[in-house]
Image (cartoon, rainbow, N blue to C red):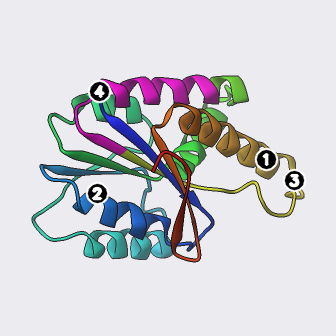
């Protein structure tokens, strides 16, 4: 059963950097599961910077915007799997649900998150999830943004409840809320 770690924090807080460094301390094969897609130049640049930050030749990578549990199941043996990030995953699920006209409820989001936790527990080694903490700021002015905030919060709460350790990164400094 994998050790599961959630690393959360605000935008540009240093959470991805901390998670990557933590993963690179773990021996064995390393897999980076990317949920972001290159939809515009800014995202292409962010993806490029993330790739450049990983040590060449020490990481395998998979891009999976939607089926994260399946990606974990298909990953094969690894010392560590780093999933970056759950917040984009929530965005992708919400966008896909809106595109299909099915909507994405908090209950369904909680179910998807529990399924992801179950998949992480089936693995050997360590699974590190990265997620933005989006619910600590101003209440968004439109219904879709509020729903996104709520869905991301639900995902984070479910993953944190089932994780062995939870780190909140503030100003580049990890503070352990659980485990550690």
Q: Which residues are magenta?
A: 109-127
Q: Is residue 36 above or below residue 47?
A: above
N-terminal-most mark, 1 or 4: 4
Secondary structure mainly formed by the magenta segment: helix
Nearest to the observer: residue 156 or residue 35: 156
N-terminal-most mark, 2 or 3: 2
Of badges 3 and 4, nearer the viewer stands: 4
Would residue 2 appear left or right of 18 to someone viewing this image? left
Q: Which mark is residue 23?
A: 2
Would residue 55 appear left or right of 45 to someone viewing this image? left
> Residue 94: x percent and y percent?
63, 40
Distance CA(mark 3)–CA(mark 4) = 41 Å
Q: Residues within 10 Å of mark 3 (few under 14, many from 20)?
A: few
Which residue is tagged 4? 1
> Residue 107: x percent and y percent?
69, 23
Q: Quadrant of the N terminus?
A: top left
Nearest to the observer: residue 162 or residue 114: 162
> Residue 147: x percent and y percent?
77, 42
Which residue is tagged 3? 142
Quarter assignment of residue 99: top right
Residue 120 falls within the magenta-colored stretch: yes
The answer to whether residue 152 is visible is yes
Q: Which residue is drawn at the image coordinates 43% and 57% (left, top)?
A: 37
Q: Which mark is residue 144?
A: 1
Would residue 168 appear left or right of 33 to someone viewing this image? right
Q: Which residue is drawn at the image coordinates 81% and 48% (left, top)?
A: 146
């Amino acid at each position: 059963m994998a050790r599961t770690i959630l690393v959360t924090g605000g935008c540009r807080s240093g959470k991805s950097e901390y998670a990557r460094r933590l993963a690179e301390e773990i021996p064995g094969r390393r897999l980076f599961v990317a949920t972001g897609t290159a939809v515009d130049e800014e995202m292409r640049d962010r993806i490029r910077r993330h790739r450049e930050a990983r040590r060449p030749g020490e990481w395998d990578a998979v891009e999976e915007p939607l089926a994260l549990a399946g990606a974990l199941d298909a990953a094969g043996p690894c010392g560590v799997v780093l999933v970056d990030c759950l917040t984009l995953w929530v965005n992708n699920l919400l966008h896909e649900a809106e595109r299909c006209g099915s909507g994405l409820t908090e209950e369904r989001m909680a179910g998807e998150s529990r399924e992801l936790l179950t998949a992480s527990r089936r693995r050997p080694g360590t699974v590190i999830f990265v997620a933005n903490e989006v619910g600590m700021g101003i209440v968004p002015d439109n219904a879709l943004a509020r729903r996104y905030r709520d869905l991301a919060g639900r995902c984070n709460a479910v993953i944190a409840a089932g994780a062995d350790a939870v780190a909140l990164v503030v100003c580049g400094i990890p503070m352990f809320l659980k485990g550690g």
